[in-house]
Image (cartoon, rainbow, N blue to C red):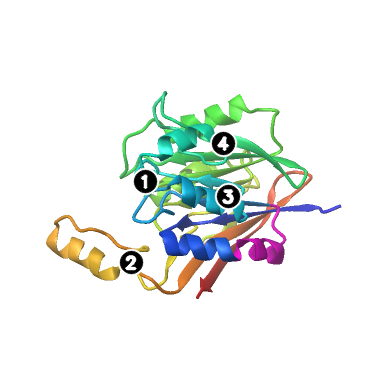
Amino acid sequence: MKTEYRILALGDIVGAEATDKVCRVLNGLRRELAVDFAVANGENAAAGNGLDRASAERLLHSGVDVLTSGNHIWQKKEIEEYIEENPFVLRPANYPTGTPGRGCAIFESGGVRLLVMNVLGTVFLDPLSDPFDAVEAMLEENRGSYDFSVLDIHAEATSEKLALARFFDGRISAVFGTHTHILTADTRILPGGTGYLTDLGMCGPEDSILGVKSECVIRKLRTHRPVRFENPSGPVELNGAVFTLDRESGRAVRVEILRRILS
């Protein structure tokens, strides 16, 4: 019997072309990396921005077990009904009561019950409720119902991401950040056994600024006026990480950065 449990975590998928290319390679990637479970942040996977039903369904049928999200999840109006009915698409748990969807769910895969949680940071972002309290509530609500747990903290501030990881060290198997679209190089296992990476980066156009045509971002920064953002075509960088857990203890034993260029 396998002694390790491997989780593939992919950074923010940006744009329709990136979605197509990720879907094309994902099952092969899972086999190559001997992955038991795959999570991806899909809040920008649709054309333009946000997530729509078609993009979500393609990713979920191509090898993603669950989609997490963040502050752009509501860009497409249709997502409200879809996220309410689909437990495989999460939104940050610290949105107000009554918000469609759910911030966590338990999935069975590879003989393991895995609790996947999603929160939105509050530093430099919308002033939602405290993400620390939201995570505490999810752990308590699901206590005894899961074997391992992971957390996607969608946030701007690196300090907020690491603070959450250190606060819950030993209580969550893997904590990773999303949102900045920049892959960080700080993989580590914290003293209590939590695997950590500040940001998974993005799965998006390589020749871009954060997945957007460079000229659009430069024009926005130089003029300070509204600019319609567009995703360029071309090779896609696939960024993320593989978290390897010990099946007996649930502690992380390795965190490996994943970076591929998809032509």
Verify whether residue 34 appears in magenta. yes
The residue pinned by badge 4 equals 87
Q: The magenta stretch spans which residues? A: 25-36
The residue pinned by badge 2 equals 209
Give the Cα distance between marks 4 and 1. 18 Å
| Dot 4 amino acid type | Pro
The residue lying at 44 percent from left, 64 percent from top is: 17
Mark 4 residue element:
loop
The residue lying at 59 percent from left, 66 percent from top is: 25
Mark 3 residue element:
helix
**Foreground residue among 46 and 1:** 46
* Image x and y of residue 203, in percent: 47, 62
- Circle 3 packing at 10 Å, graded few (<14), some (14-19), many (20+), is some
Name of the residue lying farthest toward the front: 54
Q: Quadrant of residue 216?
A: bottom left
Give the Cα distance between marks 2 and 1. 17 Å
Q: Earlier in the sequence, mark 4 or mark 2?
A: 4
Q: Quadrant of residue 98?
A: top left
The residue pinned by badge 1 equals 72
| Dot 3 amino acid type | Leu
The residue lying at 71 percent from left, 53 percent from top is: 36
Give the Cα distance between marks 2 and 3. 27 Å
Judged left or right of residue 179, residue 21 is right
Verify whether residue 30 appears in magenta. yes
| Dot 2 amino acid type | Ile
Predominant secondary structure in magenta? helix
The residue pinned by badge 3 equals 60
- Circle 4 packing at 10 Å, graded few (<14), some (14-19), many (20+), is some
| Dot 1 amino acid type | His
